[in-house]
Amino acid sequence: MSAKTITIAQQKGGAGKTTLAAQLGVALAQAGRRIGMIDVDPQGSLARWYEVRKTLVAADGAGITCIHASGWRLSGELDRLRRNADLVLIDSPPHAETDVRIAVRAADLILVPMQPSPMDLWATGATLEAARKEKTRAMMVFNRTPARGKLVDAVRRKIDELEVPVAATVLGNRVAFASSMMEGRGVVETAPRHVAAKEIRALADEIAATLL
Ligand SMILES: Nc1ncnc2c1ncn2[C@@H]1O[C@H](COP(=O)(O)OP(=O)(O)O)[C@@H](O)[C@H]1O
Ligand SMILES: [Mg+2]
């Protein structure tokens, strides 16, 4: 059976796409799933993280295979990964290019990370439109969310108007996400009891329940 595919997309840079790809991938791998990842972003941050992982954690990626592919190679590499994994995560670049269209078309679910700000909300338009066109399910994920604030509620109300589901799990603004990635790991590996690890495990469970 071919693996399910999740594409993480959002036009705005810095929304947390790469962070989400790595952290979710590690959490799902820890739950026993074979994870494939494709870094479609020419910047290659996820692929860099994976190089560190192979050096510092395990030469085989400890449950994760990650490749850096774009353009004409993308479809072939995606098929190959899908045959050998339980779940494939695609990290996409911040612009709606051909590669992002392919990644959106190939996905069973589009995850759209956004910080609770008007700029992030406005930037979701193109991604959600692409998902609608391809009839692919989309789900927003609040990232770097302050502990409490009227802004989060206001942004939530706006999303309700768009009729796009929002993950019940909200990710806070946590340095632990970035510091684990420095070591080629995810926070569930470096600080399993940290609130950041609890958040990412809850999100992974939520996604697995929707998709797997
Ligand atoms: N939940 C979070 N808490 C703290 N920092 C975060 C969080 N999510 C992302 N970051 C930081 O924000 C920056 C941009 O994140 P990144 O995942 O690279 O976004 P994108 O891939 O969408 O451009 C990085 O420095 C990352 O460490
Ligand atoms: Mg990125």
Image (spheres, helix red, strand yellow):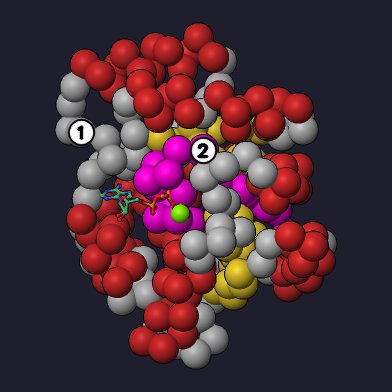
Residue ID at (35%, 21%)? 118
- From the image, tell me which residue sits under label 2: 11
Q: Quadrant of residue 42?
A: bottom right
Residue ID at (46%, 80%)? 51
Say above or below: 153 vs 96: above
Report x, y in % for residue 106.
75, 48
- From the image, tell me which residue sits under label 1: 146
**Are the residues at dot 2 and dot 1 in contact (C-beta closer than 8 Å)?**
no
- Quadrant for the N terminus in the image: bottom right
> What segment carries the magenta color?
3-21
Say above or below: 64 vs 210: below
Q: Callout 1, which amino acid?
A: Pro
Say above or below: 127 vs 18: above
Which secondary structure, mark 1? loop
Label 2 crowd (10 A; few <14 / some 14-19 / many >=20): many
Q: Nearer the viewer, mark 2 or mark 1?
A: 2
Q: Between 98 and 166, which is closer to the camera in this rendering?
A: 98
Say above or below: 185 vs 10: below
Residue ID at (50%, 9%)? 161
